[in-house]
Amino acid sequence: MPARRPTVRETEIKLRVADLAALIHKLGRLRARCHGRVLERNVLYDTPDSDFRSRGRLLRVRLETPAPSTLTPGGLPRVVITSKSPAPDSGRSRYKEKLERELVVRSQRGWPAKLRSLGFRPGFLYEKFRTIFRLAGLHLDLDETPLGVFLEIEGRPEAIDRVARAIGFSPRDYIRATYWDLYAAECRRRGRIPRNMLFSR
């Protein structure tokens, strides 16, 4: 049987990181445990009329492959299917909050056809290198993206605030936007049409 998480209320923020090596050092001083670095290839699925995006929902298939660096070891290969939907009473929060469910599957093969048969179509494709850290119940995911480096901190609000403060950030640095939001904003700034957020080949 594939590993499935029950629906949970995900509470997280992003922080823009200027110095990758320095941040990894700070996380080490906090005794955050590193679970390795992977290359993620993410595909968002939606209906032909973009119903999910317009309602703040998400359906994503993520392929993770080990990607060791000079700073961190490689992580484990996985394929994860994730659904997200708006969380009640989250509009005024300084954190990004969603209801989330994940399913870890053995292989990506067959899933695109299954999703198409249900009426979904592949849309936005984005890549990033993710180094996974864990610290006292917090998920700390360090993302190297074509837009720059970001740290996602997921957990209880008070724990997010405590760790963000310990590594030199304050609530005014918190980013609630998704990677699609950040990518689309960057395309608008450059006068480009948003397509896919990919590393240059």
Image (cartoon, grey):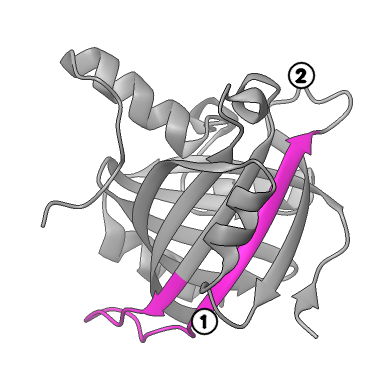
Please tell me whether residue 13 is drawn above or below residue 56 in the rendered image.
Answer: below
Q: In front: 5, or 149?
A: 5
**Residue 57 colored in magenta in the image:** no
Residue 50, position in %: x, y?
58, 25
Circle 2 SS class: loop
Residue that label 1 marks: 35
Quarter of the figure with the C terminus: bottom left
Tell me which segment is drawn in magenta.
Answer: 64-86
Give the residue at x 75% y 68%: 137
Residue 19 makes an appearance in the image: yes
Q: Earlier in the sequence, mark 1 or mark 2?
A: 1
Looking at the rendering, which quadrant does residue 102 occupy? bottom right
Circle 1 SS class: strand
Residue that label 2 marks: 91
Give the residue at x 53% y 51%: 152
User: Few, some or many C-alpha atoms within 10 Å of disc 1 (few <14, some 14-19, many ≥20)?
Assistant: some
Residue 53, position in %: x, y?
60, 26
Residue 56, position in %: x, y?
68, 26
The kind of residue tagged 2 is Gly
